[in-house]
Amino acid sequence: MQKKCAYESPEMIKLLGTTLRPGGFELTDRGIEVCQWRSDQVILDLGCGQGATMRYLNKKLGIRSVGIDPSEKLIQVARETGDDGDYHIGSGEMLPFDDDSFDGVISECTLSLMDELGTVLSGVHRILKSGGYFFITDVYARKPELVVEVKKDNFRSCMRGLYGLEDIKQQLVKNGFEVVKSEDHSERLSQLMVKIIFEYGSMGIFWQKTGGACAAHFQEALKKCKPGYYMLIVRKVV
Ligand SMILES: C[S@@+](CC[C@H](N)C(=O)[O-])C[C@H]1O[C@@H](n2cnc3c(N)ncnc32)[C@H](O)[C@@H]1O
């Protein structure tokens, strides 16, 4: 059975707008501040969705970034903005770019959607120039020992591929990165949940509208993992 992508659903787009993640551009600004990206650099937006961050980087810093996302629907929306972005349909597990070709990589609420984290991290390491920054925001499990139940569901939201934060850091280090900044921003996720409950009545109704039949078990398993939200900035060191 084909996995569902909740981020293509009209409910999700209506709720989140152009930035399909908790926290909008505020965390992106934290990344820009630490990574000090400039207009002559090339940045990849991994899981670019509708291209909102690419347009933001262009407007704010004059950066012409490259975006990749497996969703033809979201890439079409991005292209229809007429922003002249360099969009590719593809996945993080198979990056179609040359070695050492990017000064920075951004992944906002996308890593947890990818099936093979190790493959993705080694691919990001390969395409980054030495010293290049990898900026990540995403959900994580504050009770990682209970993640196994969530992963049983065939439901494609960014809550599905949860890890504990220490586990993610270890995998990054194993793949040749050093951790530069690690921050907890779980309040962003809580704010989003409050907004969902306000608009839909309950998380359950929202998940059903975006994900379908498996949502009840998914929701129960998810709650037990205590999802939080993190920002990590790492740098390619070897
Ligand atoms: C929560 S949305 C975030 C989109 C965008 N980064 C933003 O913040 O607006 C997750 C995105 O990850 C994409 N995605 C899912 N699986 C992926 C994969 N294997 N490789 C790259 N992107 C993926 C989805 O299509 C979706 O656009």
Image: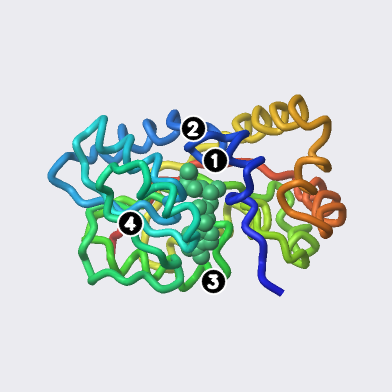
Q: Is the distance from the Cβ of mark 3 to the nearest ligand 1 atom less than 8 Å?
A: no
Q: Is the distance from the Cβ of mark 1 to the nearest ligand 1 atom less than 8 Å?
A: yes
Neighbour tally class for label 1: few under 14, some 14-19, many 20 plus, Cα within 10 Å: many
- Identify the secondary structure beneath mark 3: loop
Q: Using residue 145 as the reference point, say whether residue 117 is left or right of it.
A: left
Residue type at the position of mark 4 = Tyr
Badge number at residue 116: 3
Q: What residue lies at 28% left-to-right and 60% top-to-bottom?
A: 237
Q: Nearer the viewer, mark 1 or mark 3?
A: 1
Q: Is the distance from the Cβ of mark 2 to the nearest ligand 1 atom less than 8 Å?
A: no
- Label 1 sits on residue: 21
Q: Earlier in the sequence, mark 3 or mark 4?
A: 4
Q: Position of residue 178 (x, y in %)?
A: 37, 55
- Label 2 sits on residue: 24
Q: Earlier in the sequence, mark 1 or mark 3?
A: 1
- Label 4 sits on residue: 87
Where 203 falls versus 219 (above or below)?
A: above
Pointer 2 and pointer 1: residues touching (CB < 8 Å)?
A: yes
